Image: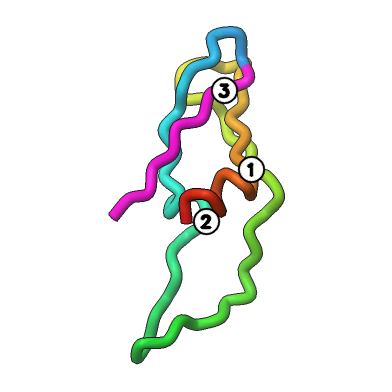
Amino acid sequence: MANIIKVPCTGRGQHVNEIDLEDVIGEDVVLYGGAIDTGRQIPAQIVRRCDECDEGKVIITREMIEARM
């Protein structure tokens, strides 16, 4: 199931972008009932381009991700 959050861009239009967290941080692999430790850390922030405009950036913070996971 997709875990979608809505984040506004930093541009003048403040366009709201829908971000799929599984697409951003990837999926966990589970074998025989136990998760595999991939050593993957959640970055402090992830910056993406706005889907609507060229000037805005979408900033996803670790706190935003942890609040939804």
* Residue at (63, 75) in percent of width and height: 39
Q: Indicate which disc, 1 or 3, sits on the residue closer to the N terminus.
A: 3
Looking at the image, is 36 positioned above or below residue 11?
below
- Crowding at dot 3, Cα within 10 Å, few <14 / some 14-19 / many 20+, comes out as many
Q: Which of marks 1 and 3 is in front?
A: 1
**Magenta-colored stretch includes residue 43:** no
Q: On the image, numbered disc 3 is attached to which residue?
A: 9
Q: On the image, numbered disc 1 is attached to which residue?
A: 61
Residue 1 is drawn in which quadrant? bottom left
Secondary structure type for disc 2:
helix
Q: Residue furthest right?
A: 44
Q: Residue furthest bottom?
A: 32
Q: What stretch is highlighted in magenta?
A: 1-10
Q: What residue type is labelled 2?
A: Ile
Q: Where is residue 61 in the image (x, y as percent from the top left)?
A: 64, 43
Q: On the image, numbered disc 2 is attached to which residue?
A: 25
